[in-house]
């Protein structure tokens, strides 16, 4: 803070999360993350919207889900009168219009159904978008869905200085839009 010439004890709101990130990255053994230097979304586990309410996105690994998971999300949406439910571009389900005071109870129910946060708000590794790959698609060269799930499980919880998106497509037709992500895989016949 001295080196950066901060004029107030709280510092500058843009620099503070960055400083917190880099101190933790460079000194993981000595430095303890400062929760107050995280953005409100990360502290509340929801994505603040323009009207002050939040959206909640449970993690759906690799975009692969089950009827039981969909039922559990529907139960939460009904129980808390969620005004809007939307499929996201990252193949997740977004529960929009949740009041801040509802967030702990919403997450309690989602957690009981086995969900963790999809980090739709975080400066973090985001979910991995996938296509169906060679399990179902006649053009598929490899199992892109399985690779996407593995990648997501491998990178889950990593903290990044900015949002970091990933995708895996099962062939060069590239339905998962892997080539416009921060990290993308396009499977080909010759791949291992
Ligand atoms: S990207 Fe290729 S493998 Fe994936 S769904 Fe499209 S055509 Fe099939």
Image: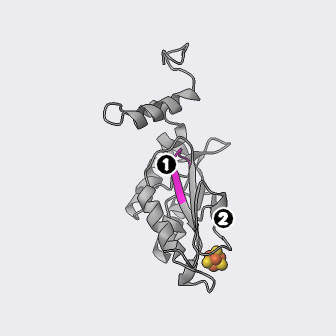
Q: Give the foreground label among 1 and 2.
A: 2
- Whether ligand 1 has any atom under 8 Å from the Cβ at mark 1 is answered as no
Report whether 110 appears left or right of 48.
Answer: left
The vertical placement of 127 against 191, above or below, is above
Describe the element under mark 1 as helix, strand or loop: helix
Q: Position of residue 148 (x, y in %)?
A: 51, 67
Looking at the image, which residue is at 48% across and 65% down? 61
Residue positioned 49% across, 35% down in the render:
38
Total tally of numbered discs in the picture? 2
- Residue most extreme to the front: 190
Distance from Cα at disc 1 to Cα at disc 2? 32 Å
- The x, y position of residue 149, in whole percent, is 47, 67
Image coordinates for residue 161, horizontal then vertical, percent: 53, 40
Q: Secondary structure at mark 2?
A: loop
Q: Looking at the picture, how far across and down is residue 106, in whole percent?
A: 47, 54
Q: Residues within 10 Å of mark 2 (few under 14, many from 20)?
A: some
Residue 109 in view of the camera: no
Q: Is residue 44 above or below residue 179?
A: above
Membership of 168 in magenta stretch: no
Location of residue 43 with respect to 132 vertically, above or below: above
Which label is found at residue 177? 2
* Of the pair 179 and 165, the residue shown nearer to us: 179
* Residue at image point 35% right, 37% down: 28
Label 2 CB less than 8 angstroms from ligand 1 = no
Are the residues tagged 1 and 2 within 8 Å (C-beta)?
Answer: no
Q: Which mark is residue 31?
A: none
| Span colored in magenta | 121-127
Is residue 124 in view from this perspective? yes
Q: Which residue is mark 1?
A: 103
Q: Earlier in the sequence, mark 1 or mark 2?
A: 1
Foreground residue, 53 or 168? 168
């Amino acid at each position: 803070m001295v080196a950066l010439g901060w004029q107030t004890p709280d510092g500058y709101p843009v620099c503070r999360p960055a400083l917190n990130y880099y101190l933790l990255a460079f000194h993981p053994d000595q430095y303890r993350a400062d929760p107050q230097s995280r953005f409100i979304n990360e502290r509340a586990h929801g994505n603040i919207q323009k009207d002050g309410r939040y959206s909640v996105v449970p993690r759906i690994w690799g975009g692969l889900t089950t009827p039981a998971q969909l039922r559990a999300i529907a139960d939460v949406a009904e129980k808390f009168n969620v005004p809007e439910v939307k499929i996201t571009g990252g193949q997740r389900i977004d529960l929009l219009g949740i009041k801040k005071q509802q967030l702990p109870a919403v997450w309690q129910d989602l957690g009981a159904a086995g969900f963790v946060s999809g980090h739709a708000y975080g400066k973090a590794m985001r979910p991995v978008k996938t296509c169906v790959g060679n399990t179902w698609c006649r053009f598929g060269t490899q199992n892109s869905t399985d690779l996407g799930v593995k990648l997501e499980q491998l990178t889950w919880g990593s903290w990044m200085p900015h949002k970091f998106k990933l995708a895996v497509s099962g062939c060069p037709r590239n339905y998962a839009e892997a080539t416009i992500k921060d990290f993308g895989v396009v499977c080909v016949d010759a791949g291992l």
